[in-house]
Each structure stands twice: as structure tokens, then as C-alpha cells.
Image (cartoon, helix red, strand yellow):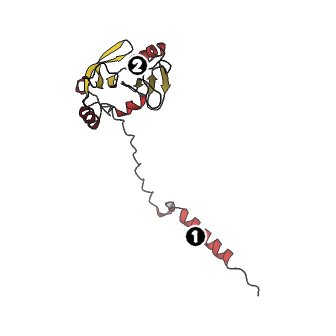
Amino acid sequence: MPRRPLLPAVALVGSVLILAGCAGEQAPSLESGSPPTPTAPVETTTPTPEPAPTVDPASVTCENLIPASVVEAFGESGWTYQEDVFRVGAQEIEDGIWCTWGDAQSPASDNVQIYGWTPLEPGLAADAQDELADQGWVREDSTEGVYVTENPDTLVSADAEGYGMTYLFGDGWVTVSHGKSSLLVIERPGV
């Protein structure tokens, strides 16, 4: 009597068992005379997006727009700040804040750092971007928002990446700093 290999038979039985396990529950039989019990539909809810927190612009100061550690380091270096209204081109935006940090005791120093923020409606933001572009500023679209930076051919001071003063326009706000990389220091209100 010839011997047949056992492996194909074991593989076939294993496959049948695996497929039987994947088949799921058996459908209810109507032969029992009772109708199947309906199951309740699973309710799914779509989360409602949280509205952006509203920020009272008056609560934003030069000392809380940037991290406390930076404010402390500036103080240790003898730097103070001058607070002003936020400016974009020729527009002054009263609800915003413009902070110029530097050594006020040194004679005519251009060694300063600028940090600013303001809420800004989309229409005004588009107008401001257009005005800056008309003055030769360079626009860069990004996932963070729209950067508008000084023309590299005419800037006086550049950061490590070659950017001068730069605005970042977001959804309902704009920030400004003396260089693009310094925008990262700003702690945007409401975020």
C-alpha cells in the first residue's frame, strides 16, 4: 500500500478550520417560529469643532507675548521694551501690540528685537499683504500661514536664514518679528 504524505491533508483540514472561524455568526433561523430580535443601530456622533478661543487684546502685553524665560534673559542683559501699536505697512491696528526690546540706555543702537501680534480680519489681512508686496516685500505661502518678509535685496539686518523683518498671517491674526525664525518665540494668544 503506497504511503501518502500527511502534510497536504493536515494543511487542507487547517485551512477549512480557519475559514470556518472567519465565517462569523450563523444567521438566525426562521424555522423556530420567532422573528429575529432587531439590534439597535449604533449611533455615531461627529464631534463639533471647538470655536477658537477669543482673546481680549488688552490682556496681551510685551511681557506675556514671549516666554517668561526670554523676558528674564532680556532683563538680565539690561534690556527693556517699548510698547507701540501694531503696524502693517501704513495701517495702524489699535487692538494689536508691537514690542521693541533693546538697551534703551545705549546711544542709538539698532541692536533690538521686535515681537508683535494682533487679531486681524481676513479682508484686512489680504489688503496688508498686498500693500507689503507692492512695496517689494516677498510673500511665501506655507502650512503655518502666509509669510511676508522684507525684500532680501534691501534689508538692513538678516537672521541666520537670510530673512529680515517678517510677518506671519494666520487665520484671524498676524504676528511680526525682526526675523522669520524669531516668530517662533511668540506665544500667540489663544493658542
Per the image, the residue denoted by label 1 is 17
Q: Residues within 10 Å of mark 2 (few under 14, many from 20)?
A: many
Mark number displayed over residue 95: none
* Three-letter amino acid code of the residue under disc 2: Ala
x, y (%) of residue 17?
A: 58, 70
Work out which residue is located at the far front of the displayed protein and give it: 107
Quadrant position of residue 158: top left
Nearer-the-camera pick, 118 or 149: 149
Work out which residue is located at the far right of the displayed protein and give it: 2
Quadrant position of residue 89: top left
Give the foreground label among 1 and 2: 2
x, y (%) of residue 56?
A: 25, 26
Q: Earlier in the sequence, mark 1 or mark 2?
A: 1
x, y (%) of residue 30?
A: 50, 60
Nearer-the-camera pick, 177 or 7: 177
x, y (%) of residue 151?
A: 48, 19
Q: CA distance from mark 1 to mark 2?
A: 66 Å
| 14 relative to 163, above or below | below
